[in-house]
Amino acid sequence: MKNQITAKRKIPVPLMMTGKGIAAKILVKLDRFCGELVVLRKKSKYMPKVTCNTLMVQRMASFGLAPEEIAFIYGVTGVQFSKAVRQNAELKRAVEGGRQIADMAVTDSLFKKAAGYYRKEFRMFKYRNRMYREPYSKFIPPEMGAIIMWLTNRRPEQWKMNPQYDKDSRYRPKIPPEEAKALKAIVEASRRGEI
């Protein structure tokens, strides 16, 4: 069942990554029938012409495959594939678009981990010799590691791991100059007893 390809051409990632077996060969053959073809390698005396479909390249990149792995599946070297990407704008957009899809999926899952989320689960119980399945929502609490990662990357000036210390080895946060002057005036006024 794993090796079968459905009408939607969903191919398991492990088979695609290997570049071996029937799945990779069928993928390359299906490639010719679904969209714009791009030449990866021109026909030479010793090697045949190799083409790829931008839609399939985008799907492979969205699965997280590196350009070298995509090149391996098509039977070209990484250098030939990167040269084709540089020369063809459609292929470049396909690779970058696939990477963006993968990045968005990871960002969404990281946000869910950092913020917490509800997951639908089922409870099984027996009542009068019959089994019943009852749906309920379970809250998955946020993970501290995901929260720290999210904040250190989104707001590094406020949440960095190693804050800046001055000569006195006291923590000195970066404050804009106008705010620093206003705070200094307030502190001096409170010392004089005006506030």
Image (cartoon, rainbow, N blue to C red):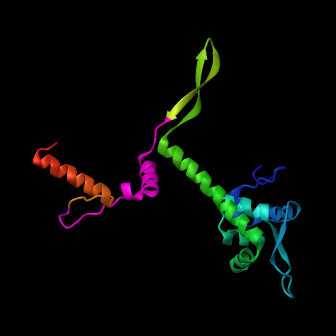
Hey, which residue is sitting farthest bottom in the picture? 45
Q: Residue at x 56, y 52 (%)?
A: 107
Taking 80 as reference, is 60 above or below it? above
Q: In the shown orientation, is residue 17 left or right of residue 32?
A: left
Is residue 162 highlighted in magenta? yes
Whether residue 145 can be seen here: yes
Is residue 113 highlighted in magenta? no
Residue 35 in the image, given as x and y percentages of width and height: 85, 61
Residue 169 in the image, given as x and y percentages of width and height: 20, 63
Considering depth in this image, is 155 or 74 the residue closer to the camera? Answer: 155
Q: Residue at x 43, y 52 (%)?
A: 151
Q: Residue at x 58, y 20 (%)?
A: 125
Considering depth in this image, is 88 or 133 the residue closer to the camera? Answer: 88
Residue 136 in the image, given as x and y percentages of width and height: 57, 26
Whether residue 175 can be seen here: no
Hey, which residue is sitting farthest right in the picture? 33
Query: Which image quarter: residue 67?
Result: bottom right
Taking 193 as reference, is 123 above or below it? above
Taking 148 as reference, is 80 above or below it? below
Magenta highlight range: 140-169
Q: How many marks?
A: 0
Residue 63 in the image, given as x and y percentages of width and height: 67, 58
Q: Quadrant of the C terminus?
A: top left
Q: In the shown orientation, is residue 33 left or right of residue 142?
A: right
Q: In the shown orientation, is residue 190 left or right of residue 84?
A: left
Q: Residue at x 84, y 68 (%)?
A: 37
Hey, which residue is sitting farthest front in the picture? 194
Query: Which image quarter: residue 57?
Result: bottom right
Hey, which residue is sitting farthest top in the picture? 128
